[in-house]
Amino acid sequence: MSTSVATRPPGPVTLTAGRLPRWSTGLLLAVCLVASLSLFAAFGSLGLIRVLLVAVLLYVVVSTALSAAVEGSRKAKDRLATTLVTSAFGLALLPLISLVVSVVGRGADRFDGTFFTYSMRSVVGEGGGAVHAITGTLWVTGIATLISVPIGLLAAIYLVEYGRGRLARSITFFVDVMTGIPSIVAGLFAYALFVIFFGPGTKSGLAGAVALSVLMIPVVVRSVEELLKIVPNELREAAFALGVPKWLTITKVVLPTALAGIVTGVMLAIARVIGETAPLLVASGFTQSLNNSPLDGPMMTLPVFVYRSYVDQGNPASAYVDRAWAGALTLVIIVMVLNLAGRLIAARFAPKTGR
């Protein structure tokens, strides 16, 4: 009885046989970029976006064809999918990068000490600053956060831990409706509410905070609700098995487990409303002076400051435009600082999984 023994082909066999080398990706990208540059240079119509798009298209075609010839159709399809996903990610980043570059480049001209220490009171033309708008933004956003976070957190806890029946469905329905409310409607609601209690023409920082809280509450409810749902039920059952009351289980087990995500959701809600202009124009109004009283008189905020700087341009117009860009840059930095602080807080108080 004879047995056949498989024989390998002559020559060395390596793990990289039939594969493109790793450096081929960078080389192909460089070649496609040079080809795209040469193509547009020949026609005299250079443009960064056009050059990049054509270079990516060339790379997709060339890399897929080369991979099919060397690695086979299966690997070529995998490389094509990877290239398309990576390209989509890069394409999504382009508007963000363009925005950041524009805001930093245009806003740095007035990013000085005067901008952060002076208001626009009695200032016409050049000079002045946005300390009144920065202070107003911190006041309005802070008060809106103090209003929204407890309400949104408690509503989410009720929906996940207690909510059953018609009341829970009604709350969910109204939260969904509030999510789609236009921001100007929230401003009109806050203005009408304060007119009822304090008379016509009443505008204050507190009214603006109420308008922003209307926009923040559904975001907080939705984000916290989803985070509480992904907390494992085994943790709740273990606490109940030890005789721990439900309210104590929520405060000592469920909320600490989801704390990192809750903080992130709150930061997203703040970032969602801190740049709103329409509701603050209606509810808070605007002023050229520093106002540290949210209950007394109009209060300027950074989004309204940027808007008014563009709408009411004086002479020279460049001074107003520079202040607007500097205000936009300040707003972006505030959002970045808040998100960084939220991440640090979440990392500090999140439950430790290791031993």
Image: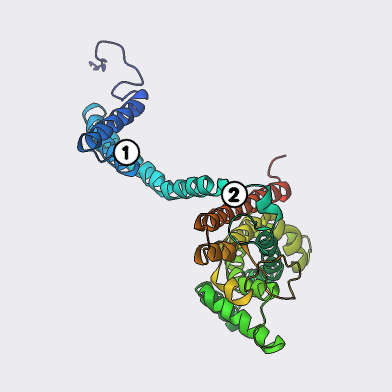
Residue at the far top in the pictured view: 11
Quarter of the rendering occupied by the C terminus: top right
Q: Closer to the camera, 194 or 150?
A: 194
| Up-down relation of residue 271 to residue 24 (above or below) | below
**What's the amino acid at mark 1?**
Asp
Residue at (61, 66) in percent of width and height: 220
**What's the amino acid at mark 2?**
Arg
In the image, taking residue 159 as reference, residue 103 lies left or right, namely left
Q: Give the SS element for disc 1.
A: helix
| Up-down relation of residue 121 to residue 98 (above or below) | below
In the image, taking residue 99 as reference, residue 11 lies left or right, namely left
Residue 177 image position (x, y, % from top left): 52, 77
Q: Give the SS element for disc 2.
A: helix
Who comes first in sequence, dot 1 or dot 2? 1
Q: Which mark is residue 237?
A: none
Residue at (32, 38) in percent of width and height: 78
Q: How many marks?
A: 2
In the image, taking residue 80 as reference, residue 241 lies left or right, namely right
Residue 111 image position (x, y, % from top left): 61, 48
Badge 2 crowding class, 10 Å Cα cut-off, few under 14, some 14 to 19, many 20 or more, is many
Q: Which mark is residue 110?
A: 2
Q: Closer to the camera, 240 or 122?
A: 122
For marks 1 and 2, give the CA distance: 49 Å
Q: Which mark is residue 78?
A: 1
Whether residue 311 is visible to the viewer of this picture, yes or no, is yes
Which numbered disc, 1 or 2, marks the residue closer to the eye?
2
